[in-house]
Image (spheres, rainbow, N blue to C red):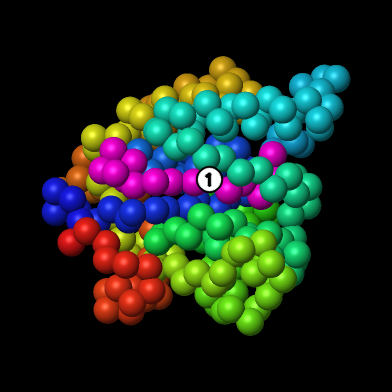
Amino acid sequence: MKNGRYTPKKAMVIVAHPDDIEFGCAGTIARWVRDGAEVAYVLCTSGDVGIAAKGMTKEKAAQIREAEQIAAAEVVGVKEVVFLREPDGMLVNTLELRKRLVREIRRFKPEVVITMDPTIVWSREDYVNHPDHRAAGMAAIDAVFPAAGQPNLFEELAKEGLTAHKVRKLYATNWNEASTFVDITETIDAKLEALKKHVSQMGDWDPEPRLREWASEVGKGKEMQYAEAFRVVTLLTDEDFDKTEGRVEG
């Protein structure tokens, strides 16, 4: 706890594509990093089918989008970005993907994991939630609980020195059925700057007016000028967490 607000020591964000973090939770990440958190990003794909320009190849698109994601991470102070390079547009919540995510969780040992809410399908009247988003969210949830914390599951990872790790809190970005709201008034400029690093996706569109509008709507009635919204599950109580990974500030 810092300045009366919760900040994890370590957090991991697991999403499908480059730019998912910037649209969903970069304001929260920027705030946590400023308050002392160590954060890692894990992207299941490199967004290699996400550039429709004539003559573009998937290999070239992956290089462009990975570079954009690394630049966006740097804006908010995140130094570690992992690309699993699963096939873009065809992401599936397989046991192999779960194992890959468990490996990253056991390696980094985050207190909090943020992912995408896989229950969202009809997100707005003009948008269907991408199947990769849903697959990444479900794979992340399944990796967090119970897999990452079960020492007898994926035992072969122990040979890599990766022992079981229990995540304390699981956040899922959700603007419809949120239970937790994070004030990003101080960091919305960083969120916007990070999003604009995804030049291949922005085109001629200026995302600032729309994102400020969205963040303002989330913060309305909560004494927050701008906010991000999450569903949050607390998997370990303070007492249980103290016994596993050590005491968090506050």
Q: Quadrant of the N terminus?
A: bottom left
Q: Position of residue 26 (x, y in %)?
A: 41, 40
Of 149 and 88, nearer the camera is: 149
Question: Which residue lies most toward the bottom here?
Answer: 152
Question: Residue 95: x and y, percent?
Answer: 74, 69
| In-image side of 158 versus 105 (left or right) | right
Could you tell me if residue 88 is visible in this image? Answer: yes
234 sits left or right of 172 in the view: left
Q: Which image quadrant is residue 47 in? A: top right
Residue 32: in magenta span: yes
Among the 4 quarters of the image, the one containing residue 76: top left
Work out whether residue 218 or residue 20 is closer to the camera in this orientation and state it. 20
Residue 156 position in % (x across, y down): 72, 71
The residue closer to the viewer here, 41 or 18, is 41
Numbered circles on residues, count: 1
The quadrant the C terminus occupies is bottom left
Q: Is residue 76 left or right of residue 134?
A: left
Give the residue at x 77% y 22%.
Answer: 53
In the image, is 65 to the left or to the right of 11? right
Is residue 139 visible in the rendered image? The answer is no
The type of residue carrying mark 1 is Tyr
Q: Does 210 appear in magenta?
A: no
How far across and down, in percent of the image, does residue 102 sit? 61, 64
Label 1 crowd bin: few (<14), some (14–19), many (20+), radius 10 Å: many
Q: Specify start and end residues of the magenta stretch as a single range.
A: 31-46
Q: Nearer the viewer, residue 43 or 27?
A: 43
The residue shown at (24%, 37%) is 185
Residue placed at 14% from the left, 54% from the top?
A: 4
Q: Residue at x 44, y 68 (%)?
A: 167
Which residue is identified by label 1?
Answer: 41
Q: Secondary structure at mark 1?
A: strand
